[in-house]
Image: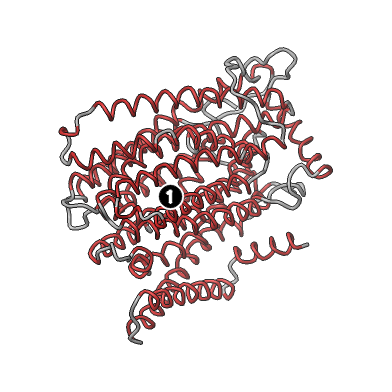
Amino acid sequence: MGDDGATVEHGPGAAEAAQPAGEAALTPEGIAADSVRIEEERRVLSIESPGRSVIGSAIVVSGATLVSRLLGLARDVMMAAMFGFSREMDAFFIAFTVPNLFRKLFGEGALSSATIPVLTRYRLRGDPAATRRLLGTLAGLLVLGLGAVTVLVIGIVWLLPPAWFHDPGKYELFRDYLTVLLPYVVFICLAALQAGTLNCWSRFGMPALMPALANLVWILVLVYIWQAGLLSQPHTAVLVVAAGVLLSGVIQWGFQLIPLAKLKLVSGPKLALREPGIRETFKAMAPMLFALAVFQVNTFMDQLLAELLIAGDGAVSSYSYASRLFQFPLGLVGVALGTAMFPLMSRFAARNELEKLTASLLNSTRLIAFIAFPAALGLAALAYPITELLFGGARSEPEMLRRSALVVALLCISLPLVSVISLLTKAFYALRDYRTPTRIALLAVIVNLVANLILLQTSLREAGLALGTAISGLLNLALLMLVLRNRLKGTILESMRAAAIPPASERLAQPLTPSTLRGIPVSILRSLLVACVMAAGAWLVQNALYLEFGLSGRGSRALAVSAAVLAGVVIYAGLSMLLRAQEVQQILTLRKRRAA
């Protein structure tokens, strides 16, 4: 496969970069032969969990992600109750964006996406020593590079005079929090590299549980702050929160060493720069780093623009609380399926089985729509009741709650868009085409920045950021679909010609037929319509319980919201089963197979 992922050459000229002595070249033919061996070992030696499909892996990730999101939600509720929409929280959220920027760049983003296809082929070769060299070198480069960046950034923020900023006091808060938070980058990026490695070996559970562990540490720190009586000193209390975040990164890195040791993949830091996978990884990372850097800097700029263009305190906190609530369904929809799909798509691309890649993309999009539409519309319908329930503590003003609820409602537009964008972007990465999503993302970021500059100065205030995200996301999705459609042109027909698929093949990669192909847009439209009915029903139940029956108070709000969510689940599941939605049958079949 060429660097742009568009073609696959055969013959001696298609060999990968020169290998060290004694190692076989990574040719497409060799990869295909090794893949057959891996499938046989899988059935005989149970290298991977028996009966585990992509949907099954996605369910594992979703379950662990659900635990993480629930703990994260409890953490945010505690943060809002203890600190509210204060200037300390504004400064903390802006400071926390900086390590998140580097985490997205070098951890979960470019490094993970560039490494997984390389690690997939290393695994197919069956050479643990080469894999350890690759992982040790990547870890060593991360420590050296990110350690230097941490020292440099901390030095810069302490050299800049606070008087240069519109609110010197808030800048000093930001500087203090950032100094404690930034070393977190080194450990969380090492943990992200570990997680990507474990995913390549079909170990999804432990990496997916790491964010839950981090949230648990954060919660314990908040409990300590409460019991120690530090709330009377909000600046000191938030500094302790920042130290807890740093501790959570160290713990995530340490815990994932255990499953890596069992796989005999633990290696100390190395600098084997001649290892072929290093060159290939960094060649793939370069364009992705550019795209992600632009996007993450744009996210940081969004926070700064909200601070600069909106009068008073609380705008950054309002958007941050809403964004964290939005991340709850996003992690269960887009992240879970995308995480489980990426190694599989990499295998399809390595074997040049593009018809399976196309089938898995179309079926995955249908599944995302089935889950994302009810999650997005349900959350939008209940945005204010949920925001008031979760963040309506004694330190939260009613006006700020209404503003944050509007942000939640507008962010919901982006839920299905971002979920599918994540899936399609990983498809390009599996095809080793890193430039196309980079260019498209850059254009979308420019559109997003312009939209934010305009919308922030309207009555929407910080909610304009959410609407700008939806506008740029729609453009991003449309362009990705257009380019990928041309790239995979003809593979649908190849899938239809397939007479049979080996038993070990993934369920989502089964051959398409004319009826199943026509059924995909029908399924997506049906999911949207049923989700609309569900959202209306959920809102009516909440409204009836809380208003018409004269209920009041946080306990009554919790009862009304819980009843509305339960009603929504019943309505959506009932109508989907009544309409014989294929997604329901697929999930039920999976459950029966796993039970057997």
Percent across and percent down for residue 538 are 42, 75
Q: In this view, does 399 lie to the left or right of 418?
A: left
Taking the view exactly as shown, the residue that stands out farthest to the bottom is: 549
Taking the view exactly as shown, the residue that stands out farthest to the front is: 228
Q: Mark 1 points at which residue?
A: 418
Q: Nearer the viewer, residue 432 or 482?
A: 432
Q: Identify whether 237 is placed above or below 489.
A: below
Percent across and percent down for residue 316 are 27, 50
Q: Residue at x 17, y 46 (%)?
A: 309
Q: Residue at x 29, y 42 (%)?
A: 447
The amino acid type found where label 1 is placed reads Val
Q: Identify whether 544 is placed above or below 596.
A: below
Q: In this view, does 530 lie to the left or right of 58?
A: left
Percent across and percent down for residue 77 are 40, 60
Q: Which of 47 and 208 is in front in this view?
A: 208
Q: Identify whether 12 is placed above or below 492.
A: above
Q: Which residue is drawn at 27% across and 41% down?
A: 173
Percent across and percent down for residue 569 are 51, 72
Q: Callout 1 environment at 10 Å: few (<14), some (14 to 19), or many (20+)?
A: many
Q: Residue at x 31, y 63 (%)?
A: 405
